[in-house]
C-alpha cells in the first residue's frame, strides 16, 4: 500500500453513519488536546524477525517476558484513529478508557494485556533506573553493569553509550527503543528506564509490560511539542482486535523490520578492545658492566643516552614551535596594519563626503546672503568657524588629509557671578557696536547728500 506523506498525517476521518450517536471527544478539553496532538508525527514501531536473532538467544529472552508474540505484531498504521485514541485516553483504577470515532473503549488492564498477547505479571519499572531499582539479594547496579557490558569495570556503571554494551544487550536496547519505549532521533545513548529494562530481560526478571506501556501512553511527555506519538502499530492492532471497522480507512505501512540487516550493521560497529602491550622483561645485571641506579634495571649509560636524545628532540620541537609562533605573529601584524590602512581610507572618504555636504550648505548660505542684500534684509551673524568658500559652486574639490587637532587645554570652572559680569560686558560691547554701526550709516548718508 502507498505510504501517506507527512502532511497527511493527523488529518481526521469523518465518522460513519453508525458512529454519529456520540460526539468524537469526551469533553471540550479533549477537543483542544486533539488540536495539539494533530501536529505530531506517529512512531509506528517495528516487527522483530525473531529467527534472525536465534544465535544470540533473543527469542528465548523475549519469551521469558511473554514478549515474543508482541514483538512479532505487524499491522498497518491508521493515523487518524490513533489521534482519537490518544485524545480521549485515560487510565484510572486499572481501566483503559478511550473513544475512537464515537465508539467508547472501556477495558481492564488484563484485557488490554490479553489483546496484545502480554502478561501483567512482574515488577513496574516505568519510573526507575539502574541506580534506584530494588535488586535481588546479592546484586546491585554494578552487577547490572557487568551483565550489560560484559566487563566488571566499575567505571561503566553510569555509562550511557549503547556501543559499549555486549551485542545481545545492543539488540535488546534497539528493541526497547523501537517498541517498548519508542523514541525518535539518535539511538546511541540509553537513558532512564532503558538500561534497567535490558538488565531485567537479560537477568530473567519479569516486567509488567502492559502497565509500562499504558503509563507511557498517558504520561505528560506526549504533550511536549518536540515528542512524537508512540505505539502506532500496536494501537492499530488493538483496534482491529476490538472489531473496529477499518476497511474504509487508508492506512500507512509500518517501518522496516528489525532483522539480520540491522544485526550486520551493529556487528560492523562493535567496539574492539585496545591491544595490550606485552610487558618488558627485566634486564638482568651483567657482571663487569656499569653500575645502574638503585631500583632500576636500565644501565646508567643507556639512561644518559635516552635523556640526551629526548633533550635534543624537545629542543628541536621548542625551536619549531617558536618559529611558527613568530611567523604567525608577523602575519597577524601585517593583517592588522592592512586593516588600519583600509579603515583610514574609508574614514578619509567619509570625511570628504561630509566636507562636500558642509561646503554645499555654506554655498547655499552665500546664495541666501545675496538675497538678503538684494531685498535689504539683515543677514545672520557669521560664525567664527566658517572657512572661505571656493570661487565656484558644487562640485567642491576633495580636501587633503589633515593632521588630527591638538588637544585643547582644560578650562577652569567659571564662577556664576563672574559669568553674569561677562554677560553684562558683552551686552555693553554689543550696544557700542550697534551705535557705531548707526554712526557709520549716518555718515554714509551725509556723504551721498553732498555728492548730489
Image (cartoon, rainbow, N blue to C red):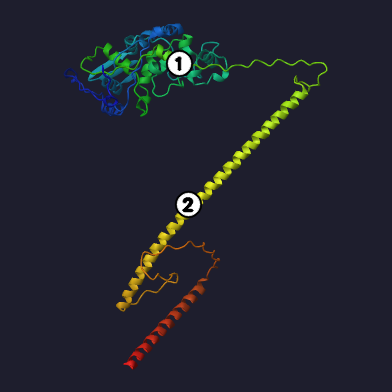
Q: Residue 329 occupies which quadrant of the picture?
A: top right
Picture coordinates of residue 245 (x, y %)? Answer: 22, 14
Q: CA distance from mark 1 to mark 2?
A: 57 Å
Checking the image for residue 342, the label placed there is: 2
Residue carrying label 1: 266
Q: Nearer the viewer, residue 77 or 282?
A: 282
Q: Nearer the viewer, residue 393 or 353?
A: 393
Which residue is drawn at the image coordinates 55% and 14% (left, top)?
151
Q: Nearer the viewer, residue 273 or 451?
A: 451
Foreground mark, 1 or 2, reads 2
Which residue is drawn at the image coordinates 53% and 48% (left, top)?
336
Picture coordinates of residue 16 (x, y %)? Answer: 18, 19
Q: Residues within 10 Å of mark 2 (few under 14, many from 20)?
A: few
**In the image: residue 341, left or right of residue 92:** right
Q: Residue 1 occupies which quadrant of the picture?
A: top left
**In the image: residue 433, left or right of residue 152:** left
Amino acid at each position: 500500500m502507498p505510504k501517506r506523506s507527512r502532511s497527511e498525517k493527523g488529518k481526521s476521518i469523518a465518522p460513519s453513519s453508525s458512529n454519529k450517536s456520540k460526539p468524537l471527544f469526551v469533553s471540550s478539553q479533549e477537543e483542544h488536546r486533539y488540536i495539539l496532538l494533530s501536529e505530531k508525527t506517529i512512531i509506528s514501531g517495528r516487527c522483530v524477525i525473531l529467527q534472525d536473532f536465534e544465535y544470540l538467544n533473543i527469542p528465548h529472552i523475549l519469551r521469558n517476558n511473554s514478549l515474543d508474540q508482541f514483538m512479532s505484531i505487524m499491522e498497518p498504521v491508521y493515523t487518524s484513529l490513533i489521534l482519537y485514541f490518544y485524545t480521549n485516553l485515560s487510565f484510572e483504577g486499572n481501566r483503559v478508557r478511550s473513544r475512537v470515532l464515537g465508539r467508547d473503549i472501556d477495558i481492564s488492564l488484563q484485557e488490554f494485556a490479553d489483546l496484545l498477547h502480554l502478561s501483567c505479571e512482574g515488577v513496574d519499572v516505568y519510573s526507575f533506573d539502574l541506580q534506584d531499582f530494588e535488586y535481588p539479594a546479592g546484586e546491585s547496579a554494578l552487577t547490572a553493569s557487568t551483565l550489560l557490558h560484559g566487563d566488571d569495570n566499575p567505571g561503566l556503571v553510569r555509562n550511557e553509550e549503547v556501543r559499549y554494551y555486549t551485542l545481545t544487550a545492543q539488540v535488546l536496547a534497539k528493541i526497547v527503543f523501537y517498541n517498548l519505549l519508542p523514541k525518535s532521533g539518535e539511538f546511541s545513548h540509553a537513558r532512564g528506564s532503558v538500561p534497567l529494562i535490558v538488565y531485567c530481560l537479560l537477568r530473567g526478571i519479569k516486567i509488567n509490560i502492559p502497565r509500562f506501556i499504558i503509563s507511557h501512553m498517558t504520561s505528560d511527555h506526549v504533550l511536549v511539542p518536540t515528542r512524537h506519538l508512540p505505539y502506532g502499530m500496536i494501537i492499530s492492532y488493538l483496534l482491529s482486535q476490538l472489531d473496529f471497522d477499518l476497511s474504509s480507512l487508508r492506512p500507512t505501512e509500518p517501518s522496516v523490520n528489525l532483522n539480520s540487516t540491522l544485526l550486520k550493521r551493529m556487528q560492523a560497529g562493535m567496539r574492539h578492545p585496545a591491544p595490550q602491550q606485552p610487558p618488558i622483561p627485566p634486564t638482568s645485571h651483567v657482571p663487569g658492566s656499569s653500575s645502574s641506579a638503585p631500583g632500576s634495571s636500565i644501565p646508567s649509560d643507556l639512561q644518559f643516552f635516552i635523556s640526551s636524545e629526548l633533550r635534543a628532540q624537545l629542543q628541536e620541537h621548542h625551536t619549531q614551535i617558536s618559529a611558527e609562533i613568530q611567523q604567525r605573529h608577523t602575519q597577524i601584524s601585517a593583517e592588522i596594519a592592512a586593516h588600519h590602512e583600509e579603515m583610514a581610507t574609508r574614514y578619509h572618504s567619509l570625511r570628504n563626503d561630509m566636507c562636500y555636504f558642509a561646503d554645499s550648505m555654506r554655498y547655499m548660505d552665500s546664495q541666501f546672503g545675496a538675497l538678503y542684500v538684494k531685498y535689504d534684509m539683515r543677514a545672520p551673524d557669521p560664525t567664527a568657524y566658517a572657512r572661505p568658500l571656493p570661487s565656484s559652486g558644487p562640485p567642491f574639490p576633495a580636501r587633503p588629509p589633515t593632521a588630527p587637532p591638538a588637544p585643547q587645554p582644560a578650562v577652569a570652572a567659571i564662577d556664576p557671578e563672574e559669568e553674569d559680569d561677562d554677560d553684562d560686558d558683552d551686552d555693553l560691547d554689543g550696544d557700542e557696536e550697534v551705535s557705531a554701526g548707526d554712526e557709520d550709516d549716518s555718515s554714509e548718508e551725509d556723504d551721498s547728500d553732498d555728492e548730489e
